[in-house]
Image (cartoon, rainbow, N blue to C red):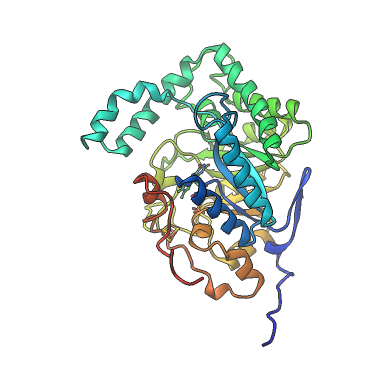
Amino acid sequence: MRKKMVKMDKLVLSPIKINNIELKNRIIFAPTSLGLSHEETVEKYRSIARGGVAMIIVGDVPVSKRGFLSMYNRKMAKHYQDIIDAIHSEGALACAQLHSSDSKFTSLIKYIPLVLIKKMTPNDLRNKLNESVPHYISTLSLKKVKEIISNFGDAAEKATQLGFDCVQVHGDRICGSFSSSIMNFREDEYGGSPENRAKFAVACVSAIRKKCPNITIDYKLAVRQEKPHYGNAGVIEEEIKVFVPLLEKAGVNSFHVALANHGELEDTIPPVNHPYFKEQGCFLKFADEVKKYTNLPICGVGCLEKPEFIEEQLQNHRIEMAAMSRQLIADSQWVNKVKNNEETSIHTCVRCNQKCLKGMQAHKGVHCIYEGRAS
Ligand SMILES: Cc1cc2nc3c(=O)[nH]c(=O)nc-3n(C[C@H](O)[C@H](O)[C@H](O)COP(=O)(O)O)c2cc1C
Ligand code: SF4
């Protein structure tokens, strides 16, 4: 049988160096909380790494030193190490998405019985949690603010000790809420002007840079859109010019640009019939805006599925990397298929959200309608 020619001329398959790491190609598995058991999670990451991606961003790694999901908890440390080993064994890099919560879950415990008797949906509970964010951010004591900032630095060090190759600062949790004029009503140096609202995120990045001088820091910049309004945390498009240079100066090495959250999850993970975000690369217009204010590599995310479309965006220098969540859940072999000229056999994500997002929301874990089909 004639051996298939490997397409190495494609930009999507070419390496890129970012600070002290080299991505073997331009495809990244976007941060995706999987809601699966330990064994299933490790195997899911292994299969995505085996499919040829350059890097996997492990979603929502808390910086807190307490709590059952903390990296400082021995069981969780082992969980992350098993994930990292699986990713490395298949030749990909592992990045920890560092985040800190921006609300007090304990204040919502009173609603749990209502959820249990189905008088309230898990989505209602999530909305209540989102509603509590402005109060939490605006009243957090300065002592606590400094403690969380310092936790980011310590967490980056801990992540590298566990074996992560780099970190992403999640700009859509506490960093995004401090950044947002509709979440942050503080009257001290962390509130008010865009420069002040940027101070918390900038301090988190600086704390990481100070603790780990050589580490590669990616920043997930969450952008809020007005006209029409989508997303609540993060920065509005007009503020990108303030935030991006400040974050770069603090030590960020690359940006990952997406729509801000703290609203409907289906806006940041848009289904095929979304009223506004339904085009391929639906959030790339935010990346275009970021590009005006930095020369650092930019990773696009959001409804990126088709190899030709992604190649075109790379060739046009709109983005330097492409991150995908659902497309790689639908077909972990995406990169290998592109390499082997087998694009037509890619299971294209149809953005139904049926088994991935809805699987997670139903506490069944992230799955896909394509599961069980021959690859
Ligand atoms: C099931 C699921 C879980 C997700 N978990 C996270 C997460 O932990 N952190 C994060 O920043 N984004 C998370 N996302 C958002 C993705 O990173 C991505 O931005 C979004 O899905 C749009 O990309 P896509 O069209 O390639 O799916 C999640 C998405 C899905 C589908
Ligand atoms: S369940 Fe639907 S939206 Fe989710 S990954 Fe599979 S095809 Fe895509």
Nearest the camera: 272 or 230? 272
Above or below, 363 relative to 27: above
Q: Decide if residue 83 is on the left or right side of residue 106.
A: right
The residue shown at (59%, 55%) is 46
Residue that appears at 48% across and 66% down: 348
* Residue 336, quarter of the rendered image: bottom right
Visible in this render: residue 277?
yes
Residue 181 spot, x, y in % from top left: 49, 26
Q: Position of residue 9 (x, y in %)?
A: 74, 70
In this rendering, position of residue 368 left or right of residue 339 = left
The percent coordinates of residue 216 (x first, y second) are: 73, 39
Rendered residue at 70%/47% (across/down): 297
Residue 8, above or below 242: below
Can you give x and y, in whole percent of width and height, for residue 13 in the image? Answer: 70, 63
186 or 87, which lies in front?
Answer: 87
Residue 185 visible in the snapshot:
no
Report the image quarter containing ligand 2.
bottom left
